[in-house]
Amino acid sequence: MASSLKQFKKRALARPEVKRAYDAAEEEFAFLDEVLKARAQAGLTQAELAARIGTTQSAIARLESAQAKHSPSIATLQRYAKALGCRVQLRLVKEKKSRTGYVAKRGTRG
């Protein structure tokens, strides 16, 4: 089954429009991965975390989803992090320009 998923991903990413969309979402998915790992390491369910923050389980589910229509505020992220014994760290990172003058995405050659 995992092999089928890998094959599907390889075929899908061979399409330029899919590859562009996938690359554009890379940072968001990396952030969501960090969020989910932090909750797992804390050993909390969404409902338990929601109770610590004073919100609902469905609000935590939305925060942890990749839905483009939901963008939590920094204050919400800070409450989420604090409930897990973490803190939010935001940084602006200068994009690297390639020799051709185009901005190279992190993790790609430039």
Image: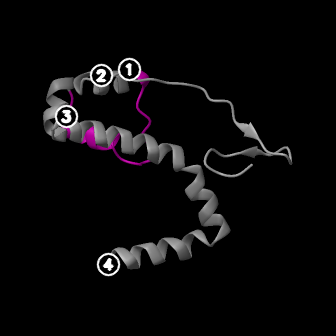
Residue 77 pos. (x, y %): 36, 27
- Above or below: residue 62 compared with residue 7: above
Numbered label attached to residue 75? 1
Badge 4 or badge 2: first in the primary sequence: 4
Give the residue drawn at x 39%, y 79%: 4
Dot 4: few (<14), some (14–19), or many (≥20) neighbours within 10 Å? few
What's the residue at 55%, 72% (across, down)?
A: 12
User: Can residue 15 be spotted in the picture?
Assistant: yes
Q: Which residue is mark 3?
A: 42
- In the figure, is residue 106 to the left or right of 51? right
Q: Amino acid at mark 4?
A: Met
Tag 2, which secondary structure?
Answer: helix
Q: Position of residue 104 (x, y in %)?
A: 72, 46
Q: According to the image, label 4 marks what residue?
A: 1
The residue that mark 2 highlights is 79
Q: If the image is split into quadrants, where does the N terminus sit?
A: bottom left
Secondary structure at numbered mark 1: helix
Q: Earlier in the sequence, mark 3 or mark 4?
A: 4
Q: What amino acid is labelled 1 in the image?
A: Ala
The secondary structure that most of the magenta stretch takes on is: loop
Question: 11 or 51: which is nearer to us?
Answer: 11
Q: CA distance from mark 4 to mark 1?
A: 40 Å
The answer to whether 7 appears left or right of 83 in the picture is right
Q: Residue at x 35, y 21 (%)?
A: 87
Q: Which residues are magenta?
A: 55-74
**Viewer-proximal residue, 110 or 88?**
110
- Three-letter amino acid code at disc 3? Ala
Given contact means CB atoms under 8 Å apart, are the residues at marks 1 and 2 in contact? Answer: yes
